[in-house]
Each structure stands twice: as C-alpha cells, then as structure tokens.
Image (tube, rainbow, N blue to C red):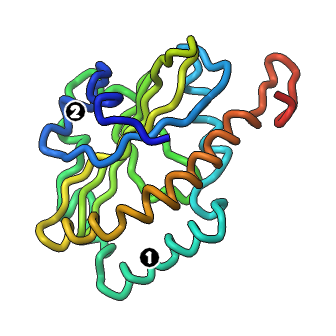
Amino acid sequence: MRLPHTAHTARPWRIHELTRDFRLEDVWAFRTPGAGPDDFPAMLAALREAGGPERQSAPVRFLFALRWKLGALFGWDRPTNGVGTRVRSLRERLPADLRKAPDTPGSGGDPFTPVYELDDERASELANTTVHTVMHLGWAPTDRGEYELRMAALVKPNGLLGRAYMAAIAPFRRFVVYPALTRQWEAAWRDRPRPADGLRPGNR
C-alpha cells in the first residue's frame, strides 16, 4: 500500500541525517499481522528467506531482466559507475555509533549494498549511471495496535539521464513491481518459521 511521504519523514529514523541531499520517491507499507515492536529482526529474516527478484511473478522477472539487458547494452551497471566509484558510499557519512551497527546482507539476488541495520530500521544502497538510490526499511506502529514494515525509496538522479530514467520507470515501479513485492513480503511474514512456538511455516 502506497503511503504519503509523511509516513516516512515523520518517523525518528536515523536515515534522515544521511540523505538530506536525496529525494524521497516512494513510501510503501507491508502489513505484518500480529507484529510487535521487537519483531523487525524476524521480518528481515523472513525477507532473506523469501529470496529476491528471481522468486517474483513473471511480469516482474521480465521487467528486471529487461532492465539488466538495457544496463548491459548501455553500460549503466559497470563497476566504475557504482557505489564507491561514481558515488561515495553512505557508509562514509555514518556517525560513530552507526559504524558499529551490523551491515548484514539482504535477500538472495539483492543488488543493494548494506549501509547499516538497527533494531527498527535498515538501509542499503545502489548506484549506476542513472541514479544513486537508497532503500530504507523501517518498523513502525499502526493505528491497529500492531507494527508494519515500511519501505522508502530515496534517490539522487544523475543529471538529465537519471531524471528521465526515474520518470520512465515510475508507472512500472508503482503498478507492477511494488504490488508484487507486497504479495511476496507479506507472504514472507505470514509463512515465516516460528520454532519457538512449534508452528510450521504457513500455519498461521
């Protein structure tokens, strides 16, 4: 479910101090029924278990394959255009306390590089010829008395090419990729293993 930008900007997350020069592109919510304030690590574990784009629907896999083909054709994804080469990593901006935070990897096939991970938020980044983007995952209370996962996409387009690219992919991102991601991630929470209470995946 798409949310207003204030659903991200109003939260006291640490990412704000690192991305003042980025533009907030999208904010999306993923329902996690029964989740409490301490369940963010469990959600991240469920996402890693669910896998990356390779487990998505056929339309989403097609869009990702097309994107990588175009990237190979035009050289968008060359190592010289990535994090640490064309752009400096956000990890260089981290204050001392965040430098000590773990930077565990994402799900399988995830092209993003971890920046930091805390008890209620995680940030990762990706850069190429078109854009430097940050994917932020945050754990937030809802008006239902539960907690939910929120994803924010923050971007810094690379000139005219980057702005044109972001405009071109906006409809696909919002009407194909994010809805498919919602189904995958909400299912990951619903079907996660819970060995502590003896439940098997899919039993809740």
Residue 13 drawn at (x, y percent): 31, 24
Quadrant assignment, res 60: bottom right
Q: Position of residue 69 (x, y in %)?
A: 44, 82
In the image: residue 182, left or right of residue 5 = right
SS for callout 2: loop
Q: Which residue is drawn at 55% across and 52% down?
A: 179
Camera-side mark, 1 or 2: 1
Residue at (23, 57) in percent of width and height: 84
Quarter of the picture containing the C terminus is: top right
Kind of residue indicated by mark 2: Leu
Image x and y of residue 28, in percent: 44, 40
- Mark 2 Cα-neighbour bin, 10 Å: few <14, some 14–19, many ≥20: some
Point 25% across, 41% down: residue: 91
Relative to residue 105, is residue 200 depicted above or below?
above
Q: Name the residue under label 1.
A: 68
| Residue sitting at x 24%, y 68% | 130
In the rendered image, the vertical position of residue 63 relative to residue 153, given as above or below:
below
